[in-house]
Amino acid sequence: MNQTKTKWMVIAIYIATLITAIEATIVVTATRAITNDLGDPNLTALIFSTYLFSSALATPIFGRMADNYGKKRIFQTGLLLFLLGTTLCGFAPSSWFLLTARVIQGIGAGGIMPMTFALIGELFDLSTRGKVMGLNNSAWGIASLIAPLLGGVILSQLSWHWIFFINIPFILTVLMLVQLFYQEEKMYAPSPQNSFVQYSALIVSLLITLSGIQLLASQIFIGGALLILGLLTLFLFYRQETKTTVPIVPIQTIQISNFRLLTICVFLINGALIGFQVYLPLWVQTELHLSATLGGLALLPSSIFFILGSYYSGKLLLRYKQKKLLQLVLAGALGGFLILSFLSNTTGYSALLLLSSFLGFFIGTGVTVSVISAQAYATQENLSSVSGFITLCRTLGQSFLVTILGVINQRSFLAQNQHIAGYHHVYLTVSIIFIFLLLVVSRSSRSEGEGK
């Protein structure tokens, strides 16, 4: 692919990532207006969970289908489903109609996200991939900053329906760019097809697991039982896949110990990132008694340095190699979270901004190094499946840790300890996670930056 077409594809990938990132955050501003208009006070949680569940369930399936039918077809299919779901959400006359549309939208997002990773892995070598991945990851930081403001403006000037309609021209733009500028080099010959039973088993296993994660916050025993059941069914599904001639998940890649280590890093570092992004603004508002705007702006340095860390991760990976760089990154992030764990409640806003910058750089580097290093274990035959699996680990990590940290935060505040706020317990938990990761990475035998 020539340079001009590659540049246009970078733009297409970035816009696709940005619209899915904005969609995950902008709806927060509209939930109250939506529930009031549709007359369903129980709608708030369902608006998010239906989108999250459907995107997580669709991700590995679309990844596998892309290896069968081509990334271009699946990327376009995901975009069209996202477009359909978005349009239906905007026209939703009732709560059930809206939730059905959110499922369609989530399935579309499940086809978009792994394809953006797979396309970056296909179009760029390792040294360039970190820069492009860093640029692409910046979409999440930008979305977290502009989505609440954009949502507020739309609600004040128009209505909640336009929260969804605003995505339509951007989706159409991406569809046009992909059609014009992406020519898949690989030719896809007919291959043995996966069975309906395989897909069903994976969906049911993930659904039970995600339901257990969601219920942990409100019904810890039922949620815990469902989570254990879900993990057991996932294990049984994996065992069965190892005996199947045409597996859905990339079995051969998963069996590589270093790949498993990297996906654990993806799972836990992305979960820690969500915990940081959720609780730092709350700290600013409740402990320093500053405005919600300043709480959100506390994440701005983190977003900027996250982009910088991601951008330079490719060069750093080539210089220090995988194991040493991960050790440095995990140690740096551990230091930042330990400081947050024992920092005084009344610490000044400027000090929190400094810590935000520090953690943004190390987390951004850690996320990108883990993803591109794990992706390096993929072959041309299973690149999309591996990208889908990595994306699924990222989603599950965020879902699991944001729930666990929420339970820890809530119980800490109920204890009414005036010396240490609940946020300290959250960040101490994240610190323990990074200690675990640092020990596991340090004990691993492989130190190469490439998968092969």
Image: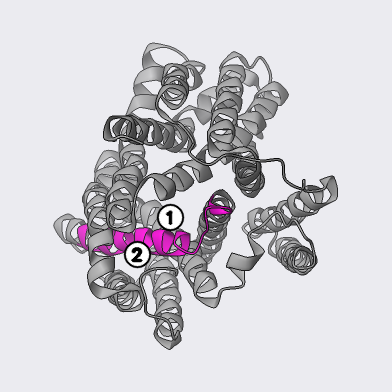
* Residue 157 relative to residue 380: left or right: left
Where is residue 429, by image quadrant? bottom left
Identify the disc placed on residue 274: 1
Is the stretch drawn in magenta largely helix, strand or loop? helix
Point out residue 301 in the picture as x, y percentages from the top left corner. Answer: 21, 51
Q: Residue, x 30% and y 78% (percent of image)?
A: 324
Kind of residue indicated by mark 2: Gly
Q: Is residue 234 above or below residue 179?
A: below
**Mark 2 or mark 1: whose residue is earlier in sequence:** 1
Q: Residue, x 63% and y 67% (percent of image)?
A: 252
Find the magenta span and give its range: 355-383
| Residue wearing tag 2 | 366
Residue 294 can be seen, yes or no: yes
* Residue 227 relative to residue 112: left or right: right
Q: Is residue 357 magenta?
A: yes
Point out residue 15 in the picture as x, y percentages from the top left corner. Answer: 38, 31
- On-image quarter of the N terminus: top left
